[in-house]
Image (tube, helix red, strand yellow):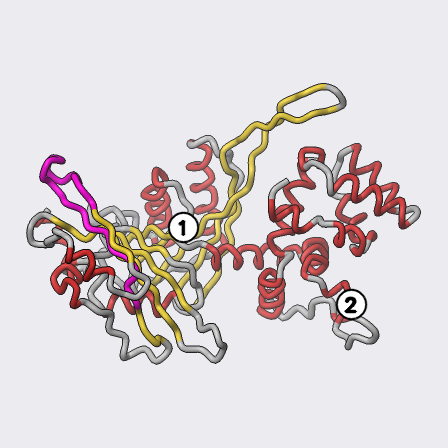
């Protein structure tokens, strides 16, 4: 059983869950095991919980397929963070979620306030809220993005229902080509000048040997995963997370054609050349992040750097050696340059890892670790501070300006 499902369907859950809710969940499945358990859930409480525990606490391959898929999704939101997402989404939709539960505790806390119980009930009674909250959880969890820059900024997007459906159909066709099935669902969300798209789709099929009675058989599973698209209208950039590399350009072209109505918007040869470490190479160990304009940032510490020797021994344009320096105290660049690394003699800085410390009232202040690999990879995990991180890179010269790109292409 997967880790998140094991935490969700633990003995405490079996002992405390509302059996009526579980009955409504099992009504969704046309499966003999589900129907048999549904009958028990309507009888004696102790017998019903024993039967429920026997199914849920056993091997996951004994679950009806649809139940397995639903429980995985409910488990993702059955946490404190998931509860926060559910409540925020209900608030956005002006839905008073389960008002009968909003009473003061008397003798003890109400078990129905448990995030697991709230997630299950939301799944059954407010499915649209559940889906949107699940999408928001994905938006907060993706930490690695591939980016595309259009030839100009201030290009608006109008994600109408018709455009979202056309984009869904187009992306579904791409997944079908790479053997991931054609199931695809898209949710779109506006967020402070950006438009986010969460794409829920099938993954590659895997097989699993299971035991039925005294016989072994093989079952096929296609798990569900989520990818995201994030478009910045002012910058004219599209960032995507969890899309396979082979699909990224095609997805970007679909987005440009359908949503922006600009088919060639992301087709320039250097459309993905967004990030650079040239300012760090020029200054060497003297480089330090400037952030005086941002009161929320306390300090930025460079934790690690990797330099790559290009050309010598490895053929033109191919790395032949690399050296990595790591120092939690912030002296990674100095240690790297103490070694025989010279950025004017064939060496290039190929990765920079740094940590941004934010001011806060709590004893443990917020911090975000960022990894930058020119020209395409930016990795971090913080939806809350994303804007500040991107602004930090831009103001320190670590993003390529559009006017630089033709010059860079000619130099290459």
Query: What residue sits right under mark 1 in the picture?
Result: 241
Q: Is residue 329 magenta?
A: no
Quadrant of the image containing the N terminus: top right
- Measuring from the top left, give residue 185's x and y in whole percent: 53, 47
Query: What residue sits right under mark 2 in the picture?
Result: 110
- Give the vertical position of 407 relative to 69 (above or below): below
Q: Main secondary structure of the magenta part?
A: strand
Q: Nearer the viewer, mark 1 or mark 2?
A: 2
- Measuring from the top left, give residue 381's x and y in whole percent: 42, 59
Label 1 and label 2: CA atoms lie apart by 39 Å
Would you say 54 lies left or right of 193 here?
right
- Identify the residue at image location x=44%, y=52%: 228
Of 280 and 183, nearer the camera is 280
- Measuring from the top left, give residue 19's x and y in whole percent: 82, 52
Would you say 238 lies left or right of 119 here?
left
Q: Is residue 308 magenta?
A: yes
Of 267 and 178, nearer the camera is 178
User: Toward which corner of the image does residue 397 lie, by quadrant?
Assistant: bottom left
- Identify the residue at image location x=77%, y=70%: 109
Of 152 and 361, nearer the camera is 361
Q: Residues within 10 Å of mark 1 (few under 14, many from 20)?
A: many
- Measuring from the top left, give residue 33's x and y in whole percent: 79, 34
- Give the vertical position of 242 relative to 289 (above or below): above
Label 1–label 2 contact, CB within 8 A: no
Element class at badge 1: strand
The magenta span reads 301-322
Q: Mark 1 or mark 2: name the one nearer the start of the chain.
A: 2
């Amino acid at each position: 059983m997967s880790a998140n499902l094991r935490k969700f369907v633990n003995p405490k859950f079996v002992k405390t869950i509302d059996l009526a809710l579980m009955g409504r969940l099992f009504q969704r499945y046309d499966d003999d095991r589900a129907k048999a358990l549904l009958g028990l859930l309507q009888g004696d409480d102790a017998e019903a919980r024993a039967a429920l525990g026997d199914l849920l606490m056993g091997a996951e391959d004994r679950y009806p397929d649809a139940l397995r898929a639903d429980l995985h999704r409910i488990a993702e939101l059955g946490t404190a963070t998931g509860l926060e997402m559910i409540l925020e989404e209900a608030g956005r939709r002006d839905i008073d979620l389960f008002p009968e539960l909003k009473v003061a505790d008397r003798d003890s806390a109400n078990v129905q306030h448990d995030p697991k119980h709230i997630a299950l009930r939301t799944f059954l009674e407010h499915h649209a809220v559940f889906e949107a909250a699940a999408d928001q959880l994905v938006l907060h969890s993706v930490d690695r993005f591939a980016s595309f820059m259009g030839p100009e900024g201030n290009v608006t997007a109008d994600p109408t229902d018709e455009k979202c459906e056309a984009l869904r159909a187009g992306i579904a066709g791409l997944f079908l080509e790479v053997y991931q099935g054609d199931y695809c669902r898209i949710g779109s969300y506006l967020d402070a000048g950006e438009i986010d798209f969460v794409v829920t789709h099938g993954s590659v099929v895997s097989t699993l040997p299971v035991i039925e009675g005294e016989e072994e058989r093989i079952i096929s599973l296609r798990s569900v995963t989520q990818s995201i698209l994030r478009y910045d209208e002012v910058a004219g950039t599209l960032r995507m997370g969890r899309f396979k590399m082979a699909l990224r350009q095609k997805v970007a072209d679909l987005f440009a054609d359908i949503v922006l109505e600009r088919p060639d918007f992301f087709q320039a040869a250097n459309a993905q050349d967004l990030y650079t470490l040239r300012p760090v190479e020029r200054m060497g160990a003297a480089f330090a992040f400037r952030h005086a304009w941002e009161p929320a940032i306390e300090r930025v510490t460079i934790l690690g750097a990797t330099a790559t020797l290009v050309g010598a021994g490895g053929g033109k344009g191919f790395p032949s050696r690399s050296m990595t320096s790591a120092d939690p105290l912030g002296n990674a660049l100095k240690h790297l340059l103490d070694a025989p690394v010279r950025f004017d003699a064939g060496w290039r800085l190929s990765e920079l890892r740094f940590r941004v410390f934010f001011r806060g009232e709590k004893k443990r202040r917020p911090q975000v670790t960022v990894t930058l690999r020119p020209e395409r990879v930016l990795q971090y995990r913080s939806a809350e501070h994303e804007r500040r991180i991107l602004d930090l890179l831009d103001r320190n010269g670590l993003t390529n300006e559009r006017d630089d790109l033709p010059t860079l292409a000619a130099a290459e």
